[in-house]
Amino acid sequence: MTGPVVVCASQVLAHTPHLAAHGSKPSRELPGNAEVTEQFLASLRSFEAAVAYPPNQAYMSAIHPRALPARPWTAISDAGASRWTTGGEIMPEEEFLGLLASVDTAGLTTLGAGLAGRASAALEAHPLAKYLDLAQLDKARGDAEAAAAGKGAASVDLGSGPEAVVRPGDEVDQSLAAAVLLENLAAKASATLALLHLLHDYDIEPGSIDYVLGCGEEAIGDRYQRGGGNLAKAVAEAAGCSEASGADIKDFCAAPVPALVIAASLVQAGVFSRVAVVAGGSLAKLGMKFQGHLRHDLPILEDVIGGSAFLVQADDGVSPTIRLDSVGRHRVAAGGAAAQIMEALALEPLGRLGLATTDVDDFATELHNPEVTEPQGSGNVPERNYRTLAALAMRRGDIAREDIDAFVAQRGMPGFAPTQGHLASSLCYLPHALDRLTSGPATRAMLIAKGSLFLGRMSQLSDGMSVILERNPSQT
Amino acid sequence: MDLDSQEQILKLSETHGASSLVVIIGAPDPEAAEITAETVTAGDPSYAGVLAGVQLGLDVYHIFDDAIRAEVPDDVWEDQIGVMSDVLDAPALAAAVAGMRDQGGGGAS
Amino acid sequence: MLKDRHVIALGERDGVSGPSIAACAEAAGATVAFTATECFV
């Protein structure tokens, strides 16, 4: 069965060290603690350091995660590292704040004159300039100090006082608090940047997109509909997809895979021809593990907001195909133990297709950068996932115990994604998978995404979904 | 430890009494397991929650402790834990929590 | 040791989850008084 294909995928990062103070954990720990705040601010990375950081280059697809050098990656400074890659970029903070103001249709953002001028000039020189609403950015120019003094304002200090300020969307409605809107605007801006790169780096006519699915984790709404959603359509609008509508898929970190599967299903069923899937980053997760980083004399590593976008359409004879008959899901009755989840997501579909784990070249699972997670005691998440998978593969008889290390190294990979939830949950590997399945030697890649539903207190369950991408049969 | 969890644990120790309670930890990292164990014995070391400075002295084990394993039927253990005792460093995790237990736990009220 | 005692199951998503600990405790004859699973990513 030749199913729909993933044509292209783009990935972006915004380097936002000063927004990191607005991450959930720092925003709760820094105020009133001058000493820690001083340490935090002194540990912020420069743009150059963020660009040169190997995991960020892997996220940008400049290198494959298996080609990452030995750790510590913070010790490596690749002078040749570029801000730009096909399909994406790492954007500096001031430009990103300008971009954020430009997608702020409610006009809640104020940029001080200096920042507005610099951001405007930089974005006018940006390769995607003609697709950006720089007029909206100009409207944001104003008195940042005065705006910062406004009730409930969220103000971003770039080192010399407030320069970017978001005011609340409503005086009283907590769902429209300035901090919430700052998060949502950051997600919108990063998703829009990713979609713009997807369209224009890969020559996709914006008007050819019929539908956009969002798979981020922010809540868009007001007091009466806190999670109303559809950031996807807002992003479609901002990216000039005039023929598209959209909807958001909400599944905590697992969302990218159901979004991909639903996009593929819409195409396969003939409902739409071209469906884009987009995700912005999570400002809330910036600086989440900062205490561990400071304790270990590391910079604030969670200083990037990611974004991702990819395109699904009917078979084009070239692009990797989506095996809609390979979808694994975590059924309600499947059990919550880590091994039971991996069994349901990875092994059951393979068994159903008559495949072994050794028939999959790349398994992409939760790929959080261990350099970020280990200092705070959260361990190496990808490694644990791969060891669990390998142990199950061994129990199944696919490999022997002594092959476990090789299985993990060859079919798994080191984590490289920022700790931005859904972005790390297999989605970050998609551009690499497309490359491996077209110009590379791979035949089959499995994307495995998981989500912690229990965090919302409506269930004690987790969730997850998996899907296999294959080299296009016309290419074998 | 999650602040809400600290509150629930404090309430439970007031309702049931420390000696009838057993805390079982599932953390994958020995350092993290130790901090959780300390929180329910000597008090929250991060001074963030209601257990800051509160010495509950609860009996605490990591799920991988031999004492726990011995009491769980094999089929349940296989289903719920299975390969995870191979994937994670079970002895180190059990030891990290046992260290805290021996220092300040045991059900003292 | 577990039989007839009240268990507090503090799980972690990347280790052993709360519900898994709770299932083990119940099978050992304990009552589970509280279950939580933390997620740090």
Image: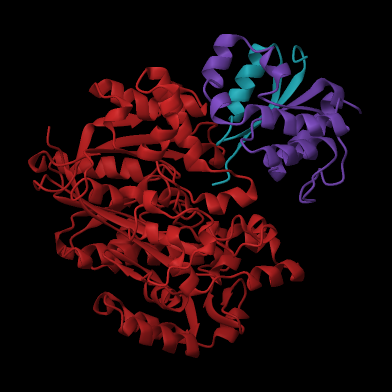
Res A345 quadrant in image: top left
Res B29 quadrant in image: top right
Q: Nearer the viewer, residue A86 or A271?
A: A86
Locate residue A448 relative to residue A165 in the image: left or right.
Answer: left
The location of residue A420, given as percent across then percent down, is 47, 54
Residue name at image x 33 percent, y 58 percent:
A61
Q: Which chain is red in the rendering?
A: A
Q: In the rendered view of the protein, which quadrant contains the N terminus of chain A?
A: top left
Locate residue A134 relative to residue A371 in the image: left or right.
Answer: left
The type of colouring in the image is by chain
- Tell me, yes or no, if residue C9 can be seen here: no
Task: Determine whether A451 is above or below A295 in the image.
Answer: above
Q: In the rendered view of the protein, which quadrant contains the C terminus of chain A?
A: top left
Q: Nearer the viewer, residue A383 or A240?
A: A383
Q: Colour of chain C?
A: cyan
The location of residue A323, given as percent across then percent down, is 21, 35
Task: Determine whether A9 is above or below B9 in the image.
Answer: below
Q: Colour of chain B?
A: purple
The location of residue A354, given as percent across then percent down, is 24, 21
Residue name at image x 34 percent, y 81 percent:
A123
Q: How many marks?
A: 0
Q: Nearer the viewer, residue A257 or B77?
A: B77
Residue name at image x 53 percent, y 73 percent:
A167
The location of residue C35, given as percent across then percent down, is 65, 29
Locate residue A237 relative to residue A35 in the image: left or right.
Answer: left
Task: Determine whether B72 is above or below B101 in the image.
Answer: above
